[in-house]
Image (cartoon, rainbow, N blue to C red):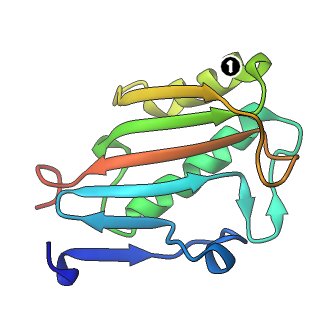
Amino acid sequence: MTSEAVRRVQGQSPWEESFGFARAVAAGDRVLVAGTTAFRGDVLYGEGDPYEQTKVAFATAVEAIGEFGLGIEAVIRTRLYLAHARDVGEVGRAHKELFDSVRPAATLLVVEGFVDSRVLVSVEVEAFRGAVNP
């Protein structure tokens, strides 16, 4: 794959610059969105609320694929990382509200924690742009 076939976009994560990563990368027919939390700049939205953090994180991820002309209908995979198993119901509810009509492949994992202890959820999105936006 040539370097012209890969395009990267930056977002508002406070860690993108210091860690050296892009919010989303398009390569061929796929757009991959990096782990996304409810941070926008230095502000954490939905502190203490896993449902709200999930909604904000997915909104940010969907904005990222929007940079490539895609919307939720192009999402084929989601990954959800939770700090606490107790939050599965609220995180699942937020996921269903957004993706019920799309039904992407989804993985949910409970992890040890995140860089900032106030983060309860991190999400990843993978979108397909071949048939949706040639």
- The residue under the point 68% across, 78% down is 18
Q: Is residue 112 above or below residue 25?
A: above
Q: Quadrant of residue 82?
A: top right
Question: In the rendering, at what x and y percent does residue 108 appear?
Answer: 55, 26
**Left or right of residue 15: residue 102:** left
Q: Residue at x 82, y 45 (%)?
A: 46
Q: Element under label 1?
A: helix
Q: Nearer the viewer, residue 19 or 14?
A: 19
The residue beneath circle 1 is: 88
Which residue is drawn at the image coordinates 69% and 70% (left, top)?
Answer: 15
Q: In this rendered view, identify the residue nearer to me: 74 or 108.
A: 108
Query: In x, y percent, where is residue 96?
Result: 52, 24
Residue found at x 26% / y 74%: 6
Note whether 69 is above or below 16 in the view shown: above
Q: Position of residue 27 (x, y in %)?
A: 24, 65
**How many numbered circles does the render carry?**
1
| Quadrant showing the N terminus | bottom left
Location of residue 25 by image quarter = bottom left
- Residue flagged by tag 1: what amino acid is it? Val
Q: Residues within 10 Å of mark 1 (few under 14, many from 20)?
A: some
Q: Is residue 112 above or below residue 125?
A: above
Towards the viewer: 90 or 97:
90
Q: Position of residue 38 (x, y in %)?
A: 71, 52
